[in-house]
Amino acid sequence: MSKSFKLVDLERPSSTPSPHPPQTNWKLCIICQEEKGEALTCPSQSKRQDVGSGYRSLAQNLMKFQELELLGTLKLERLDEGHGIEAAMVTNTAQYHQTCRLKYNNTKLQRAEKRTLQTEGDSQDIPAMSKRTRSHSRSSTTESKAQELCFFCGQPAGADGLHEATMLPLDRRVRTCATFLEDTELLAQLSVGDMVALEAKYHTKCLVGLYNRVRKAKSEGHEDTDHERRVSAIVFAELVLYIEETRCDEETAPVFKLADLAQLYQSRMEQLQVKVNTKVHSTRLKQRLLAQFPDMRTHNKGRDILMVFEEDVGAVLVKACELDSDNDAVYLARAAQIIHRRMFGEAKPFNGFPNRCQEESVPSHLLALVSMILEGPSIKDQMEDTSRSALGIAQMLKFNSIKHRRNRDNSSSLTVRHSAAQVTPVPTYIGLMLHAHTRKRDLVERLSHLGMSISYDRVLELSSQMGNSVCEQFYREQVVCPPTLRGKVFTTAAVDNIDHNPSATTAKESFHGTSISIFQHLSYTGEGVDRSVVINEGLVNASSKIIGHLPQYYTDVPPVTSNVKMSSVPAARLASLNRSDSSQLRKHTEDENVWLHNTKQVLEDENETHDNTSWAAFHASHQPPEARVVCHNALLPLFLDSAHTVAMIRHSMDVVTKAVQYLNPGQIPVVAFDQPLFALAKQIQWTWPEDYGEDKLVVMFGGLHIEMAALKTLGDWLQGSGWVNALVQAEITTPGTADSFVT
């Protein structure tokens, strides 16, 4: 049975034309005949009194659109079963998508009729505008004949004749070409006006010659790089596989348009971030395809070039269509050899996870092969960006690849030793993440044996390298300040005791030390100076798992000989309140009155429920929405010394002061303590005012202790005021619970 030739549509899947008109599937949308995620609308199920009026209006609009020849691909013949379109819709309980119905609504119909009337009116006005007197026609004809010269070469019409410029896009393109070529003579002619207003005439070959000059100048100024040549080879291979897949159809013989293939080739190149300055050279692409397919022939049809396969070349067609397992095995071996050769390179030191580290860690050929395996080798399937799954699998393949197999007697105990050049970001990240979250060596080693993670020893090496790099930065900056903190940002600190397993003070697993936390309050995202550390893997002891020492000024806590308990409390320096400007106080008082008025309305209205009745909820609902910025925080290395000592509190104040002065020079340090440590800090300020005075260091309660102190003060005020009796008499709570509120 001979094949029927069919032109391949590269935009949508082609289908064999049916000799009979298509039948309507009344269970689908009657307009598009497709299944979408959108729900179907059936006018017969409407609750209106005039059921079925939706069918009537749709049928009328479709008939009017057909008269205007604006129906598009919709054929009204398949909706008419002999008694009219409306009757067929009612009989079959027709359904449609609302988006499809909107294409033929009354608004679209009125606009289409208006455009049609305007077009007809313009066509009727043309003859009236072109009427001239006999004498005027003669003079204009004589002048035009005398001036009929080519706009580009200045020569008369000749045998080829002249064409008149009638469209402004032609003028814009000619101006662009003249500007690109820096043709001063042509630019001088165009400076008088556009070609349409000048009634310019030209030879076709002169205009084509101008376009060819521009294309040649662009192609000469661009030289393909190695990356562009590699990407071009990959895209051409995908195009060849697409043609082969289309060719495997046994029922039809595909016919390709060279222009469509060139456009598909250019789109794929641009998607792979290869800038194509000029149009794809279709002739060169045709020659490459003919070299790839010896049985392909080209035929000219007007301006289009059609490419088909020659049926009678029996040997070539049989070899191309048969699925020969031997050839497939050879192709697989060659592909594996090509990819394996490109998977080995130079070792790169670990430097964290910068941007595009995953894409740069694997060769482009390996990534293209994995994408073809996952998504299909056709060029139509490769139009999307590289998926994260393909990128991860490619990294795992490179991580587990070896140059030569190691022969051993016991093959079951063979352990793959990964070269530093083959380590990719994904297995490194998996090993570091598991160790940071679980601290379990067995889990990391198990994934390492499966080829999914780096070894536990490598995790310890990288952890040591990161710690040593941070310690080097501490020594270089002469201050212990984590690299995650940013410079020139308002910074505060908090000091507290940290206890682990406090059941016994002498237990081996217990810990009673001091912690210092640094907080940075950013006004906007990205504020300040970045202080990210660069991991240094080129050290002499890079493979060591020992972390260096911290600076001595940080680890050594100097002793204190003075007795701070006997220090005298200095007189408080109070600043008088300025009551001249009472606008702010008046505003806050008015806000409180508004809340009281709202509370009164809530209490009087017993039927409706209100959300914002409390003081906090009411004021929170009236605050303007603000973009919250995440604050940076870091925990400094822990101290083994107990926090409840004057020496440790004084040393922590020194550490915070030095860190704040380094991060944000000129800022007064602000340190928060809990209540016992706050008392020690204030005594230190009173004992050494020249170093830790209140003008040099701000010492304050933490947020929790401020709230606890405020509530305790309110309880002292309410003690003995009759508050407990009022709550009990109002039957709100019991005496014991009411007394607990106060105390």
Image (cartoon, rainbow, N blue to C red):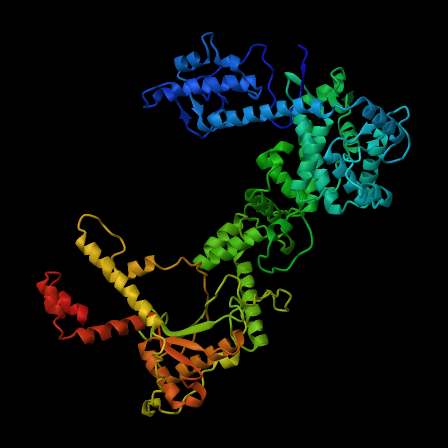
**Considering only vertical position in the picture, is 530 above or below 559?**
above
Q: Residue at x 66, y 29 (%)?
A: 242
Q: Horizontal and vertical percent for residue 643?
A: 37, 78
Asked whether residue 331 appears in the rendered view, the answer is no
Q: Horizontal and vertical percent for residue 516?
A: 42, 73
Q: Quadrant of residue 6?
A: top right
Asked whether residue 309 appears in the rendered view, the answer is yes
Quarter of the figure that contains the C terminus: bottom left
Query: Does residue 75 appear left or right of residue 378 in this picture?
Result: left
Q: Which of these two is toward me, 682 or 411? A: 682
**Considering only vertical position in the picture, is 325 above or below 512?**
above
**Considering only vertical position in the picture, is 578 above or below 267?**
below
Q: Quadrant of residue 467?
A: bottom right
The furthest residue to the top? 82
Quarter of the figure that contains the N terminus: top right
Q: Residue at x 72, y 38 (%)?
A: 233
Q: Horizontal and vertical percent for residue 215?
A: 80, 39
Q: Horizontal and vertical percent for residue 490?
A: 48, 71
The furthest residue to the left? 729
Q: Residue at x 53, y 65 (%)?
A: 527
